Image: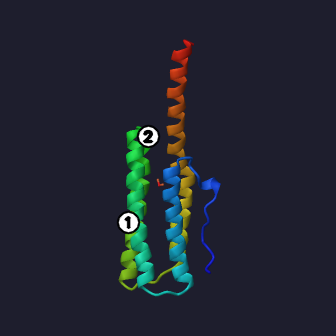
Amino acid sequence: MTQHLIDWNSAYSIGLDEIDDQHKVLFDIINGMWASVINREKGAPLLDALDELERYTVTHFTAEEAFMRSHGYSNFEAHKKQHDQFISRVRSERQSIEAGGPVSLDMINFLKDWLINHILVQDKAYAAEFKNKKLGVLGGFFSRLLRI
Ligand code: FEO
């Protein structure tokens, strides 16, 4: 069995179960791509994996953006820009491989590093703001209740 490129651990959790589950799927897809390259599978399996990565990334980013919008996330535009840039990169890698370009471990490492950095910095930032807002609302509620 091929070793994983990335394994999920609690350091990657942003504290929102649904989003964490989606990130785990992205890890699985990237591990699948890594296995394709390590096992020297040519063409189709890697292209299928890149298609899957693009499809699932769009699904995940759409869900995450809806969540951020619904909670009025203060850094929404910058976060969305990062999402759009990542999808463009995945699409251009797929097109390049479709056109017969080389498959490189560097490309898969880039996708992995980008995803980890994005989760640890950008995704954790919106999750923290969401939690602080929730605590603020609860604090206001208890203040009113206790008239303090
Ligand atoms: Fe989970 Fe902003 O991507």
Count of labels in the image = 2
Vertical order, 74 against 88 (above or below): above
The x, y position of residue 6, in whole percent, is: 60, 67
- Residue named by callout 2: 73
Location of residue 112 by image quarter:
bottom right
Observer able to see residue 74: yes
Q: How is the image coloured?
A: rainbow
Residue depicted at 45% across the width and 79% down the height: 46
Q: Secondary structure at mark 1?
A: helix
Residue depicted at 35% across the width and 83% down the height: 99
Instruction: Indicate the amino acid at tag 1.
Output: Arg
The x, y position of residue 40, in whole percent, is: 53, 87
Residue furthest out toward the top: 147
Foreground disc of the pair 1, 2: 1
- Image quarter hosting the N terminus: bottom right
| CB within 8 Å, label 1 to label 2 | no
Checking the image for residue 74, the label placed there is: none
Residue depicted at 41% across the width and 64% down the height: 56
- Image quarter hosting the C terminus: top right
Vertical order, 28 against 34 (above or below): above
Mark 1 → mark 2, Cα distance in angstroms: 24 Å
Instruction: Tell me if 128 is positioned left or right of 58 in this view.
Output: right
- Residue named by callout 1: 55
